[in-house]
């Protein structure tokens, strides 16, 4: 840690001409505009009445007379809106918790033990990482039918967990590989068991990577559409992203004010998580990536 | 208080490859055993077998008279200090030390009492609420020791505990570990690659190389009576000078030895020892420690002249790198002896040297074992 | 030293083996049942005229499904579209992401702000941004307004989403826009992991900035490039939501990608499940081949370094 800080300080001491510096800031700001304008446009459209949302000239910021919360009012009074939100939060939270538990346990075992079939298991995990979840649509749907998971939130949670666990395991394993074995051995010598090591060392020491994959798993479960719309056919079971697409189609694909009000609302939990946990978005992802 | 006994212990890490072969050792009840050797010699593996972190391929290990081959580490009543301290970064110093007791469900007030006592002994009381990250290397080392001590084990295992410290701290911690050893009165088994640590701390040294025990003995024995070329070369700094393929002749009951271009009649004591062992004429390896060669004076008989190549000033003494024909060697002389040598790199001077023949070591050229 | 030997081989005793199995089992069960078993099943199904539901008999069809996929023009279009999307999005988001990372790495203030803002699209749901881009690219959308009334490049609105290549390009632009932040973050981390001494030594040796980039920066972030490449390729084949939302595969299945086409074949038409399974298997094969190729291309140097 200290070394890294030192290094970045060293790097900052490298000489740069003021011209180079200002070019960088200008380019970064230009890029930022492209990143942010669509978002601003979305928020501003959500604040405009539907009839003037498309009137020319398009204004990025609505005028004070135009601005209205009526779109939000309409969306919030939609039947089942809060049910969708609730469903999505349940699904995303459960997926996150399950996959964090499963993948950290798997990662610990694969990283630390040489048991028969270990390499086979690891290659299966790598292979399943490569395959898009939806590519297994047919057999998975059949499985869901067999286990009566259709129209059941569990049908979404379990499959999401199975989809994200391989990659989570891969990332956490990379992290655990770098935790000195001496730490496990010290506990083992002091009378701890495999469980003690998992609980006292792994869960604590690998927490940055677990937090990072959890953030991603949450976002994934929060936004997935394909499987969710397949499995959850009843309206009161829908998750938010599916509900948004349905809502969009139900409104003749023109009432953008409503749609954007809904998407803005859907972004609130994500933004909250982002602001609260932002360091995990970056640290954990990079720890896996830098190693490669 | 207890001793450790290993008898004919083997560790095979691949088919046919042994990390440790035929290791036997018996310690007393209050002994500081140092396993020393170059990296990869099997010393750490041996320690880990005693700890129970590594299975034993063959042989028996006894702790306190009990066979522990299949006993789990936690039941062996041992504690271990790891090379990188193995401190948990997310726990405070207190929790790090207390952890082993917490796992064993020792009552809280007793934990508190024992941790405090240990912290007191090691002088880390004021750091108990800090995280290891906020400590210096020496303080971390103390915490690691504290974690071992708090268990009050019968045996302490230490795996290169000082190798991550700088030279000054290392000296200081060395003394403290020795003090601790005397205070606790238990057996310490200590692994290091540093022969200075071995010499200064041990009551018994085990020199290892390539998974084999080369010699077991007190520091004094190991230094003065190395059993083979490896031990002789490994212990002592600068290293002992070796002269390969020197003819040793036995004629009329008298042994003469030729090396450094000079024919020496060996002193009385060596003559007796050699004839007792009935050593015949042949080629031998001669070992001479740097301090057993000095600058010759008028009275010396068998003088050897050699070229001075480099001189290294160490403060109270000077190391002179000498060359004679193909042989190069080092001698150690007191600094005050000749002001000329205290200058760096005064080279290309010829010096007359005298060798303390009573202190030379003779090794068999084939087996490289000490002839005496 | 002892680290050379497999410590763990016999590290734990019997009871601990059972405990380890207890840790392994839940993950194994879930992955095995819900992903590994379906993969095998999918492979089997691809050789059958698979039927789902009561009293349906699935007939063995040999390679019929594969033949169907290969002779199906629409499947070809879907695969070609996926490759188009991949070839456009993967290099561009990597290059732009790397450039942004280099610039952020080279400035002193507001680095955190820039990082957070560039990352914002990454965390936003695909449904949300796809709807947003659908609006922006629609006939009366922001882009056409900009082209017509601000830049006066054209007098009539361009139907971005109503023809194949413009629609795919619009979707790809969404993919790039959303992916830049992700690439920026991992490349930034990789850049910061390069020891500053390398650059100091290089500038003493007289390497200019360009040379420093190609001789020090690039070789040192090679692992990250590989990681990003593999992840992005997997991601490109995973594309479903943006197409579904932005074009719905229209017009006339011209803009389908593999997953949307698969979905359509499975549920919209009379359940061509064997066909879908065969297509899935082909996609899986394509991704695996690409991944293996990438590792082959990148790994020789890695092994050199090891030895």
Image (cartoon, helix red, strand yellow):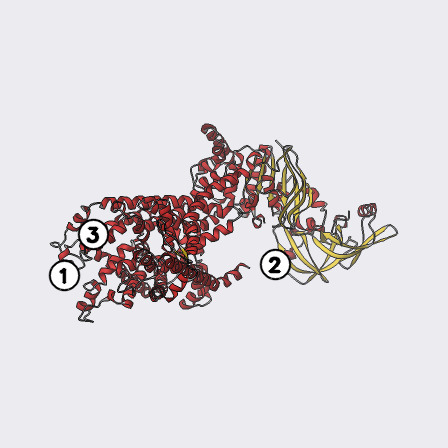
Q: Is residue A186 left or right of residue B33?
A: left
Query: The residue tagged with tag 3: helix, strand or loop?
Result: helix
Query: The residue tagged with tag 2: helix, strand or loop?
Result: loop
Neighbour tally class for label 1: few under 14, some 14-19, many 20 plus, Cα within 10 Å: few
C181 shown above or below B174: below
Neighbour tally class for label 2: few under 14, some 14-19, many 20 plus, Cα within 10 Å: few
Q: Which residue is mark 3?
A: A261
Q: Mark 1, chain letter?
A: A
Location of residue A259 by image quarter: bottom left
Q: Is residue B72 left or right of residue C210?
A: right
Location of residue B181 by image quarter: top right
Q: Position of residue C126 (x, y in %)?
A: 29, 55
Q: Mark 3, chain letter?
A: A
B35 shown above or below C105: above
Q: Is residue C5 left or right of residue C108?
A: right
Dot in front, 2 or 3:
3
Kindly report the distance in space between the C-alpha atoms of the residues bearing marks 2 and 3: 83 Å
Quadrant containing the C terminus of chain A in the rendered view: bottom left
In this view of the protein, which residue sits in the foreground, C203 or B147?
A: B147
Residue name at image x 52 percent, y 35 percent: A191
Kindly report the distance in space between the C-alpha atoms of the residues bearing marks 3 and 1: 18 Å
In the rendered image, the residue lying farthest to the right is B252
Q: Which residue is mark 2?
A: B344
Q: Position of residue A245 (x, y in %)?
A: 25, 54
Q: Which residue is mark 1?
A: A55
In this view of the protein, can residue C221 be seen by the observer?
A: no
In this view of the protein, can residue C166 be seen by the observer?
A: yes
Q: Mark 2, chain letter?
A: B
Q: Are marks 2 and 1 on the same chain?
A: no
Dot in front, 2 or 1:
1
């Amino acid at each position: 840690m200290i070394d890294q800080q030192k290094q970045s300080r060293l790097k900052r001491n490298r000489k740069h001409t003021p011209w180079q510096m200002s070019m960088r800031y200008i380019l970064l700001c230009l890029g930022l505009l492209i990143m942010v304008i669509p978002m601003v446009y979305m928020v501003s459209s959500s604040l405009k009445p539907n009839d003037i949302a498309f009137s020319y000239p398009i204004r990025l910021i609505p005028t004070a007379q135009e601005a209205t919360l009526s779109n939000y009012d309409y969306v919030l009074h939609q039947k089942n809106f809060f049910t969708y939100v609730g469903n999505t939060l349940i699904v995303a939270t459960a997926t996150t918790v399950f996959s964090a538990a499963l993948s950290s346990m798997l990662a610990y075992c694969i990283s630390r033990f040489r048991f028969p079939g270990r390499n086979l298991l690891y290659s299966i995990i790598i292979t399943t990482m490569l395959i898009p979840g939806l590519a297994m649509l047919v057999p998975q749907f059949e499985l869901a039918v067999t286990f009566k998971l259709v129209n059941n939130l569990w049908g979404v949670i379990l499959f999401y967990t199975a989809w994200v666990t391989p990659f989570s395991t891969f990332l956490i394993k990379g992290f655990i590989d770098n935790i000195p074995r001496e730490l496990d051995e010290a506990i083992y010598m002091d009378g701890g068991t495999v469980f003690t090591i998992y609980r006292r060392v792994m869960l604590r020491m690998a927490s940055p990577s677990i937090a990072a994959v959890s953030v991603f798993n949450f976002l994934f479960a929060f936004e997935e559409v394909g499987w969710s719309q397949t499995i959850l056919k009843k309206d009161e079971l829908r998750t938010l992203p599916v509900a948004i697409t349905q809502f969009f189609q139900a409104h003749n694909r023109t009432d953008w004010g409503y749609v954007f009000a809904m998407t803005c609302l859907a972004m609130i939990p994500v933004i909250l998580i982002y602001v609260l946990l932002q360091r995990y978005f970056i640290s954990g992802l990079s720890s896996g990536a830098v190693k490669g | 208080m207890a001793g450790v006994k290993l008898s004919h212990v083997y560790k095979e890490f691949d088919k046919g490859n042994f990390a440790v072969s035929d290791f036997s050792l018996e310690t007393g009840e209050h002994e500081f055993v140092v396993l020393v050797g170059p990296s990869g010699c099997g010393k750490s593996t041996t320690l880990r077998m005693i700890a129970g972190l590594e299975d034993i391929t063959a042989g028996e290990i006894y702790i306190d008279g009990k066979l522990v081959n299949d006993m789990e580490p936690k039941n062996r009543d041992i504690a271990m200090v790891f090379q990188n301290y193995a401190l948990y970064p997310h726990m405070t110093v207190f929790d790090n030390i207390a952890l082993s007791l917490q796992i064993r469900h020792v009552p809280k007030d007793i934990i508190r009492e024992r941790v405090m006592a240990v912290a007191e002994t090691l002088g880390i009381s004021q750091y108990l609420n800090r995280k290891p990250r906020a400590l210096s290397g020496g303080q971390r080392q103390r915490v690691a020791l504290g974690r071992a001590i708090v268990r009050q084990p019968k045996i302490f295992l230490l795996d290169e505990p000082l190798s991550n410290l700088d030279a000054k701290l290392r000296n200081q911690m060395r003394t403290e570990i020795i003090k601790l050893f005397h205070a606790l009165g238990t057996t310490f088994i200590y692994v290091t690659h540093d022969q200075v640590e071995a010499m200064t701390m041990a009551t018994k040294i085990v020199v290892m190389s390539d998974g084999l025990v080369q010699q077991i003995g007190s520091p004094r024995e190991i230094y003065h009576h190395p059993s083979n070329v490896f031990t002789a070369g490994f212990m002592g700094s600068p290293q002992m000078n070796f002269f390969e393929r020197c003819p040793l002749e036995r004629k009329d009951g008298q042994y003469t030895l030729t090396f450094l271009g000079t024919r020496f009649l060996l002193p009385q004591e060596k003559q007796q020892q050699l004839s007792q062992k009935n050593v015949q004429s042949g080629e031998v390896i001669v070992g001479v420690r740097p301090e057993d060669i000095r600058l010759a004076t008028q009275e010396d008989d068998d003088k050897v002249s050699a070229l001075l190549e480099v001189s290294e000033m160490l403060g109270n003494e000077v190391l002179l790198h000498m060359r004679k024909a193909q042989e190069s060697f080092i001698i150690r002389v007191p600094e005050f002896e000749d002001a000329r040598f205290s200058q760096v790199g005064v080279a290309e001077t010829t010096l007359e040297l005298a060798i303390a023949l009573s202190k030379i070591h003779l090794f068999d050229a084939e087996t490289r074992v000490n002839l005496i | 030293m002892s680290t050379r030997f497999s410590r763990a081989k016999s590290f734990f005793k019997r009871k601990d083996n059972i405990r380890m199995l207890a840790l392994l089992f839940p993950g194994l069960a879930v992955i095995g049942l819900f992903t590994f078993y379906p993969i095998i099943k999918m492979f089997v199904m691809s050789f059958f005229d698979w039927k789902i539901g009561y009293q349906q008999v699935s007939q063995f069809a040999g390679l019929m499904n594969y033949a169907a996929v290969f002779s199906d023009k629409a499947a070809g279009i879907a695969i070609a579209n996926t490759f188009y999307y991949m070839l456009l999005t993967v290099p561009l988001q990597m290059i732009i992401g790397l450039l942004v990372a280099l610039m952020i790495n080279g400035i002193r203030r507001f680095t955190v702000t820039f990082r957070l803002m560039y990352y914002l699209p990454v965390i936003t749901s695909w449904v949300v941004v796809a709807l947003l881009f659908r609006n922006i690219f629609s006939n009366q959308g922001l882009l056409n307004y900009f082209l017509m009334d601000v830049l006066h490049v054209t007098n009539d609105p361009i139907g971005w989403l109503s023809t194949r290549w413009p629609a795919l390009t619009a979707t790809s632009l969404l993919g790039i826009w959303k992916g830049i932040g992700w690439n920026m973050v991992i490349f930034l981390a990789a850049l910061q992991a390069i020891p500053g001494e390398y650059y100091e030594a290089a500038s003493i040796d007289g390497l200019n900035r360009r040379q420093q980039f190609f001789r020090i920066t690039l070789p040192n972030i090679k692992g990250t490039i590989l990681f990003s490449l593999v992840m992005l390729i997997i991601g490109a084949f995973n594309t479903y939501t943006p197409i579904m939302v932005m074009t719905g595969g229209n017009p006339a299945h011209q803009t389908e990608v593999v997953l949307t086409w698969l979905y359509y074949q499975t549920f919209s038409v009379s359940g061509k499940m064997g066909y879908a399974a065969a297509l899935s298997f082909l996609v899986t094969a394509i991704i695996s081949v690409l991944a293996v190729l990438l590792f082959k291309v990148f790994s020789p140097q890695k092994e050199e370094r090891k030895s």
